[in-house]
Image: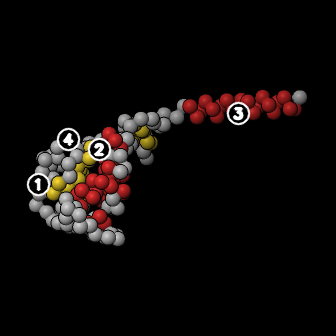
Amino acid sequence: MRGAMLIIVAVLLGAGLLANGFGDDNVSSGSSPTPTTKPSAGSSTTSSTVVQAHDAAQVKVLVLNGSGKSGVASNTSEQLKALNYTLLEAGNAPGGPFPQSVVYFVPGYDADAATIAGKLGLPGTSVQPLPTPPPASVGDPKDANVIVLIGQDAPIAGGAGAGTTTTAAN
């Protein structure tokens, strides 16, 4: 009798836990933003959006060399292409050289820009939304989702944390 009661209790407990597991509204699939609600100190609630990175092949990246060193944009493009990003034709940033790298993103691509910055050894502070109109250092952003302006601080340009410098032609 005791064994039967333990089995019944275990089944009911398992069913309750299983039902709660499927009821989680904060679980997301796909690449679209998912709104979540967080309770605040008062009686009202605030809503925030969790933005997830897209599949790399869906992200169009424009790399601009603003470091003043030859070959930096093409080397960076090759590095990102190896990670399966879609690369637009690399070029030189108008008005360079620039001391600081910037990774610009269009709305909805901030997580992708942060990932790219991390892969290139750039600090999270280099990630910024692309202003309207785009800055002169970008020129024509084409239809890029993320624009990487490589400055003199970038490791690939011989900046902070760099192991080697590049000399290949752009």
Question: Looking at the rendered structure, which numbered label has been put on residue 143?
Answer: 4
The quarter of the picture where the N terminus appears is: top right
Dot 3: element: helix
Residue that carries the numbered disc 3 in the rendered image: 13
Please tell me which residue lies in front, 47 or 11: 11
Instruction: For residue 100, say whether it is visible.
Output: no
How far apart are the alpha carbons under marks 1 and 3?
Answer: 63 Å
Residue 69's x, y, as percent? Answer: 19, 66
Please tell me which residue lies in front, 19 or 99: 99
Residue 35's x, y, as percent? Answer: 39, 37
Residue that carries the numbered disc 2 in the rendered image: 86
Instruction: Give the amino acid at mark 1.
Output: Ala
Q: Earlier in the sequence, mark 2 or mark 1?
A: 2
The quarter of the picture where the C terminus appears is: bottom left
Q: Residue at x 42, y 39 (%)?
A: 37
Residue that carries the numbered disc 1 in the rendered image: 136
